[in-house]
Amino acid sequence: MYYSNAESFKKATGYEIDGVWYPRVTSIVSIKAKPALYHFYAGQASFAAGEAVKAKSAEEGTLLHETVEAILKGEDSPIPDSVAPAVSAFLDFKKQNEIIPQQIEARIISKKHHYAGTLDCLAELNGQLGVLDIKTSYAIYRDYGIQTAAYVEALSEAPSMPSLKRWILRLDQARHCIKGCGSKMREKGGNIKIRPAKGVAAARCPHVWGDLLGEVELKELPGQEQDIKAFLASKALWEWENDYWLRQIFRK
Ligand SMILES: [Zn+2]
């Protein structure tokens, strides 16, 4: 990444809170390589085409995020057609589970480790308090543990905070093959991805895609202690990488 000066670095990678600059959790976790991304880029016509798909896909993810957060806040906002199947899956989830949000899109700060972030939701879910992070991805990746561990660690600095759970709520939408082979087709950022079901039947099936259906998956993440270690290791590496700018900011 190139930054023209310390100010642009600070803006791009952190938050200024009460006159103090903190690096952002999502900037820090981005230091970890994501090998799956190479496969994604390799499947695109060009790097620029891959970037365009990623940007469009991020935009769709943001729209779904905002819609779901508005629902959690109890706001009566319209549901955009493009994300309606996923939102409908979320509404079903909400009916089947007791979810009481305490903070939505809340800023967290770790004074101990010096970082800040924005968590999607601190909520009581079926009677247990925890961080609920919403993802709009193909699957629940292990990397999500690093990000959510940072939020839990920061929240736990408050002396009265009880021990917190960590959950990923994955929301997505896909078309299923109506021939019954079990394969799925997902369109994101204009990119079509077919996930064939395992087996000969799926390989030979002339897929016929049905309506877009919402998907919802909740996963509790175990291993806070292991994940916070990985986060702090990522932070050390991120600081090493950005040493030039950090020296200017902190006049080391
Ligand atoms: Zn099929």
Image (cartoon, rainbow, N blue to C red):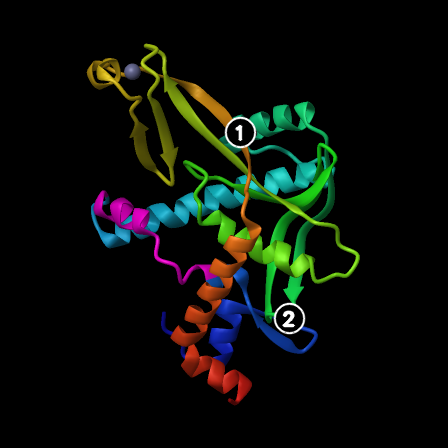
Identified at 34% across, 45% down, the residue is 53
Question: What is the quadrant of the N terminus in the image?
Answer: bottom left
Q: Residue furthest bottom?
A: 251
The x, y position of residue 137, in whole percent, is: 44, 39
Residue type indicated by callout 2: Lys
Boundaries of the magenta span: 29-43
* Residue 242 part of the magenta segment: no
Residue 154 occupies quadrant: bottom right
Q: Is residue 70 left or right of residue 144?
A: right
Q: Secondary structure at mark 1?
A: strand
| CB-based contact (under 8 Å), mark 1 and mark 2 | no
Q: Is residue 55 above or below residue 195?
A: below
Query: Disc 1 residue type?
Result: Val
Identify the disc placed on residue 112.
2
Disc number for residue 242: none
Disc ID at residue 216: 1
Q: Residue at x 28, y 21 (%)?
A: 198
